[in-house]
Image: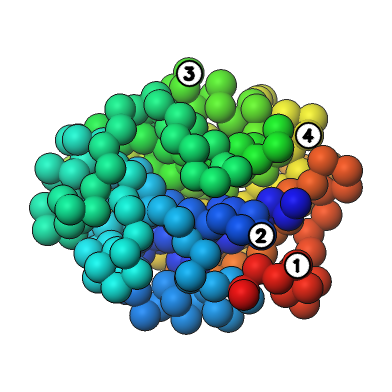
Amino acid sequence: MAFFFASLNSGSNGNCYCVGNENDIILIDGGISWKETEKRMLQIGLSIKKVKAVFVSHEHIDHVKGIEVLVKKYNIPVHVNEKTLKGAGNFIPKSAAQLFTSGETIQIGALLVHSFSKMHDAADPISFVVEHQGLRIGVMTDIGKPCDNVINHFKQCNAVLLESNYDSNMLDNGKYPYLLKKRISGDFGHLSNEQALDLFLTHKSKSLSHLMLGHLSQENNHPSIVQDLFTKNSVSTKISVASRQHPSEIIMVSENDNKKAAPNSMMQLDLFN
């Protein structure tokens, strides 16, 4: 059965990611409007009707601002921990919330969603690894530094969407106030290109077929910098960069060849109907 992931939007303007198979899709975070979520899924051949749950990494507005209307319109449950639910306020309807404790594994159809704590300046921030038939896709953004949890889960993944938020030189020499620069580069801020690259080179699995870099800063990074940096340091892992404006292509994860599928071949797997 097909196992895939895609970014619908990645950045401080909104974060939303799809992981799923032919029957079950989950969204990780809901930081764009329901209209954009539906439209962007349609653009890459996915049906929002197959979304079985939304999982929330933390309460910051660029991860939750689209959830309230999305879950009410489509009656989708929201899996969230208690502190994140409290911090998100009205963005997450309590009637739709299904509480879990960080570290738990939740089953959605044939998908196993593993949650784990990370370092970020939020109430109880977590990231997720989604497992299907022994294959694992990680969605790991908003990380101050790679703690043991992040490293251990990264090692087990066949594909990862990983934060690569800022270029250190651009941040140091940019126009942001000093305290904001310290917040971004601190242990509870975001991963730099250099930190993300070190995590990749030091801890990648031999079976890591695809690395998508995401949550790039508009002011302190550029897709070409990230693409070039990781491509020249990668031998067998395919590298791509998630956009702040557009959905990515669908990335297939396979035990056999781990090759990306073109959108047309994905539609032949009947992901839309």
Label 3: how many Cα within 10 Å (few below 14, some 14–19, many 20+): few
- Find numbered disc 3 in the image and state the secondary structure of the residue it sits on: helix
Residue at the spot of label 4: 207
Q: Which label sits on residue 228? A: none
Q: Give the Cα distance between marks 4 and 2.
A: 22 Å
x, y percent for residue 103: 39, 24
CB atoms at circles 1 and 2 under 8 Å apart?
yes
Q: Residue placed at 56% from the left, 21% from the top?
A: 152
> Where residue 269 is drawn, which disc sits there?
1
Left or right of 257? Residue 167 is left
Q: CA distance from mark 1 to mark 2?
A: 7 Å
Up/down of 260 relative to 100, above or below: below
At x 22% / y 64%, what residue is drawn? Answer: 68
N-terminal of the pair, mark 1 or mark 2, is: 2
Residue 227 shows up from this direction: no
Residue at 18%, 35% in the rendered image: 83
Residue named by callout 3: 148
Q: Is residue 17 left or right of residue 248?
A: left
Q: Which tag, 4 or 1, sits closer to the chain's start? A: 4
Type of the residue with mark 2: Glu
Q: Which sits in the foreground, 220 or 17?
A: 17
